[in-house]
């Protein structure tokens, strides 16, 4: 896995608390922080993208705005999903109607 | 009841979605469904496990005789998807038939080249053709919903919006 250095300054008390945790759990302090941070980041990212995708699906935010907020890749992917979801609905409506006539 | 002339190619994700809300059997009775040997192998792998997806896969495999199962040479490969998905994509290209999948990455990379739909297409098909009530279709859509997945969220909201209008 590719990594990047990320330095932060932390309150002394927090570092002391981390020392306690690492001693009691018998884990490496940095590794523990990385794991906890990864979990939080994943949760928060998903929560925020859920909110953004809701706004987008409801037409309350444009793709361009999404691109400015979170980048082209996610904006493109959201657009693809929306387009195909709409096409799926359209196909279901058109062909379902024909099928009803066929069976009536 | 005679099957409609419409054929669909389904991947593992779509088969699992449909079986998870108990409409696969109905879909198989109304439409001609095609899948690939590699999709069947994936299901057989899932079926080895004694968990929710294992049970769903076992149920799908009970209907194996009702699908058409084919293999297809991969002549055109999409860089970001697995070989199973590449085979399904190539089958769709070769046969000029729509692919139904819930793999959003596959959809994203193939939508300009083939006809592709998400599995809730069958909820709308069944509703519009009189095989499902609106209330039941909405109930099943809720069951399909994955509240922790932003990609699925878009599919859910757009389908729900349309179902509510009917």
Image (cartoon, coloured by chain):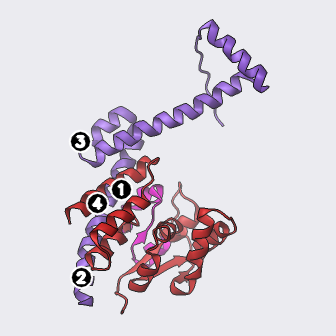
Is label 2 on the same chain as label 1? no
Q: Colour of chain A?
A: purple
Q: Which chain is red?
A: B
Q: Would you say residue B62 is visible in this rendering?
A: yes
Disc 2 + disc 1, Cβ < 8 Å: no
The reply to whether residue B38 is visible in this rendering is: no
Is disc 3 surrounded by few (<14), some (14 to 19) or many (20+) residues within 10 Å?
few
Give the CA separation, mark 4 to mark 1.
Answer: 11 Å
- Place residue B31 in its image quadrant: bottom left
Q: Callout 4: residue from which chain?
A: A
Q: Which residue, given by chain and number where applicable, does mark 4 sit on?
A: A86
Q: CA distance from mark 1 to mark 3?
A: 16 Å
Disc 3 designates what residue?
A60
Q: On the same chain: label 3 and label 2?
A: yes
Point out the tag, 3 or 2, that comes first from the N-terminus: 3
> Which disc number belongs to residue A98?
2
Q: Which residues are magenta?
A: B90-115
Could you give the CA–CA distance between mark 2 and mark 4, rounded to whole angstroms?
A: 19 Å
Residue tagged by mark 1?
B156
Distance CA(mark 2)–CA(mark 1): 24 Å
Q: Reading the chain from its start, which is encountered first: label 3 or label 4?
A: 3
Q: CA distance from mark 3 to mark 2?
A: 33 Å
- In-front residue for pair B87/B7: B7
List x then y, in percent, for residue B78: 51, 59
Q: From the viewer's perspective, tell me whether residue B90 is left or right of residue A67.
A: right
Q: Can marks 4 and 1 be said to lie on one chain?
A: no
């Amino acid at each position: 896995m590719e990594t990047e250095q990320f330095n932060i300054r932390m309150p002394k008390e927090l570092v002391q608390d981390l020392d306690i945790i690492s001693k009691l759990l018998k884990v490496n302090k940095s590794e523990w922080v990385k794991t906890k941070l990864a979990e939080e980041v994943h949760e928060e990212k998903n929560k925020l993208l859920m909110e953004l995708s809701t706004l987008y699906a409801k037409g309350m935010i444009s793709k361009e705005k999404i691109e400015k907020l979170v980048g082209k890749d996610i904006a493109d992917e959201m657009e693809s999903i929306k387009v195909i979801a709409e096409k799926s609905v359209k196909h279901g409506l058109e062909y379902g109607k024909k099928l009803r006539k066929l069976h009536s | 009841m005679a099957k409609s002339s419409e054929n669909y190619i389904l991947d593992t994700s779509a088969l699992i979605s449909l079986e998870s809300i108990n409409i696969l059997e109905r879909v198989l009775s109304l439409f001609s469904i095609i899948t690939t040997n590699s999709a069947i192998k994936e299901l057989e792998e899932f079926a080895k496990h004694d968990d929710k997806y294992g049970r769903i896969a076992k149920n799908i495999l009970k209907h194996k005789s009702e699908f058409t199962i084919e293999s297809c040479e991969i002549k055109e490969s999409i860089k970001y998807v697995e070989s199973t998905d590449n085979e399904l994509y190539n089958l769709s290209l070769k046969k000029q038939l729509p692919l139904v999948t819930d793999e959003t990455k596959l959809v994203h990379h193939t939508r300009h080249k083939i006809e592709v739909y998400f599995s809730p297409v069958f909820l709308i098909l069944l509703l519009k053709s009189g095989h499902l009530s609106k209330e039941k279709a909405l109930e099943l859509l809720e069951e399909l919903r994955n509240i922790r997945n932003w990609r699925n969220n878009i599919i859910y909201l757009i389908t729900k919006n349309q179902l509510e209008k009917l």
